[in-house]
Image: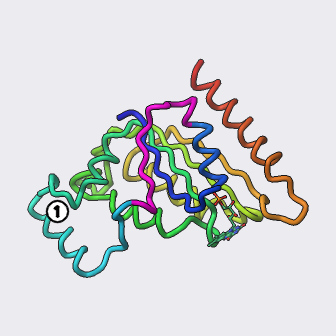
Amino acid sequence: MKTLFVNACIRKESRTRRLAEYLLKRLDPDYVEVKLQKEAIHPLNEETLNRRNELCAEERFDDPFFTYARQFKEAKTVVIAAPYYDLSFSALLKDYLETINVVGLTFHYLDDDLPASLSNIKRLIYITTAGGTIVSHEYGYGYVKTMFECFYEVKDQAYFFAEKLDLLGADPEAILKETKDKIDSYLEKLEK
Ligand SMILES: Cc1cc2nc3c(=O)[nH]c(=O)nc-3n(C[C@H](O)[C@H](O)[C@H](O)COP(=O)(O)O)c2cc1C
């Protein structure tokens, strides 16, 4: 698998998903999609955390518990589409991240206690849209950016956003077009 599309969009008419699909069509039409709201991904609870700890201690990484983590680590490019919710992203994405970050499977700690990647991932592209202004990019993309740098050593990253889509008098299609133009410029550079 070359490209994994992590789709954290919820609405049928999601504009974040539209931007992601616009990019993916040209980047890699054969992408594999994980549509988070349709997947059996749940917040960790005491039972599942204990199960996970047991499996990790026994290094049973072929267990179905780690299906999403195994899929994730094989991708070369990860494209995340996540609408801007409550200054960040929806809990769907946080649950997914807790599901795929597995010490001993997707990353590990070196002797000096620094994390190092056990994945094939070389590139992250993060896409979001916001109804208003993105007051800080740190709590949404910034958080995921640091995670990918820290656990997966991914320096090749791109971030696309469209904001102020829901403001009174806004022209959402014009705003989305501006972001699409940025995506076009990015892809042109990649293709060179
Ligand atoms: C639960 C929820 C929380 C939201 N929180 C914010 C927010 O904190 N700031 C903001 O500007 N817009 C917020 N919005 C508006 C969305 O960011 C905006 O409508 C976005 O474009 C939705 O993406 P979509 O079209 O892909 O579904 C929120 C929307 C929902 C449903």
Where in the image, quadrant-wise, is ligand 1 located?
Answer: bottom right
Report which quarter residue 129 is drawn in. bottom right
Please tell me which residue is depicted at 21% across the width and 54% down the height of the picture. Answer: 104
- Local crowd size for mark 1, using a 10 Å CA cut-off: few (<14), some (14–19), many (≥20): some
Taking 34 as reference, is 111 left or right? Answer: left
Taking 128 as reference, is 38 left or right? Answer: left
In this orientation, which residue lies closer to the viewer: 139 or 82?
A: 82
Please tell me which residue is depicted at 32% across the width and 74% down the height of the picture. Answer: 44
Residue 116 position, x and y percent, is 31, 48
Instruction: Kindly tell me whether mark 1's CB lies below 8 Å from ligand 1.
Output: no
Residue 97 position, x and y percent, is 40, 60
- Quadrant for the N terminus, please: top left
Please tell me which residue is depicted at 55% across the width and 52% down the height of the picture. Answer: 81
Report which quarter residue 147 is drawn in. bottom left
Please tell me which residue is depicted at 64% across the width and 24% down the height of the picture. Answer: 188
Q: Which residues are magenta?
A: 24-38
Q: Which coloring applies here?
A: rainbow
Q: Residue furthest left?
A: 58
158 in the magenta segment: no
Q: Residue furthest front?
A: 12
**Residue 37, placed above or below residue 117:** below
Residue 79 position, x and y percent, is 50, 44
Number of callouts in the render? 1
- Would you name the residue on which mark 1 appears? 56
SS for tag 1?
helix
Residue 88 position, x and y percent, is 59, 66
Say what amino acid the circle numbered 1 marks.
Answer: Cys
29 in the magenta segment: yes
**Residue 171, placed above or below residue 84:** above
